[in-house]
Image (tube, helix red, strand yellow):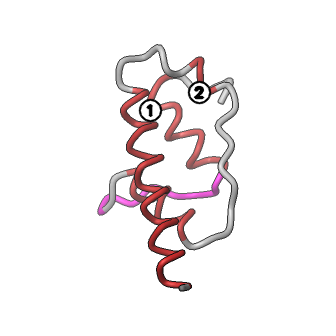
Amino acid sequence: MAEADGAEGLLSALFHALGLVGEQQQEPVQQICNHLSRRRAILVLDNLEQLLVEPQAPGVVAILLRMLVGAARQTVDHLT
């Protein structure tokens, strides 16, 4: 995350790290969540505190985390 700059930089860094290609039909946060929900993964957002100073960044992180937690709950519910 050190090279990321703001909310857009965060999403771009995640796309690059996950090997994703942008699709016009989905929001970037949704694409990231869809990608991660199909895998067993640990998402580490190192140096994230540097991005949280931009006004939009906390909102993007909150949406991302909320969606990932929701996807994890659906997976657990499906397994039980």
Q: Residue 8 lies in what quarter of the image?
A: top left
Locate residue 37, reporting x and y percent.
53, 67
Locate residue 48, reporting x and y percent.
60, 27
Residue that lies at the very extreme toward the front in this rendered image: 80
In the image, is 61 to the left or to the right of 47? Answer: left
Which numbered disc covers residue 55? none
Q: Is residue 2 above or below residue 16?
A: above
* Amino acid at dot 1: Glu
Q: Residue 22 lies in what quarter of the image?
A: bottom left
In the image, is 6 to the left or to the right of 63? Answer: right
Which residue lies under the disc numbered 1?
A: 8
Tell me the CA gap for discs 1 and 2. 8 Å
- Classified by dominant secondary structure, the portion drawn in magenta counts as loop
Q: Tell me, yes or no, whether the highlighted magenta stretch contains residue 57.
A: no
User: Quadrant where the N terminus lies?
Assistant: top right
Task: Give the residue at x 40% y 36%.
Answer: 60
- Determine whether the residue tagged by mark 1 lies in a helix, strand or loop: helix
Give the extent of the magenta segment. Answer: 18-25
Q: Is residue 38 above or below residue 22?
A: below
Which residue lies under the disc numbered 2?
A: 4
Q: Is residue 4 above or below residue 60?
A: above
- Determine whether the residue tagged by mark 2 lies in a helix, strand or loop: loop
* Residue 30 vs residue 25, the one in the foreground: 30
Q: Tell me, yes or no, whether the highlighted magenta stretch contains residue 24.
A: yes
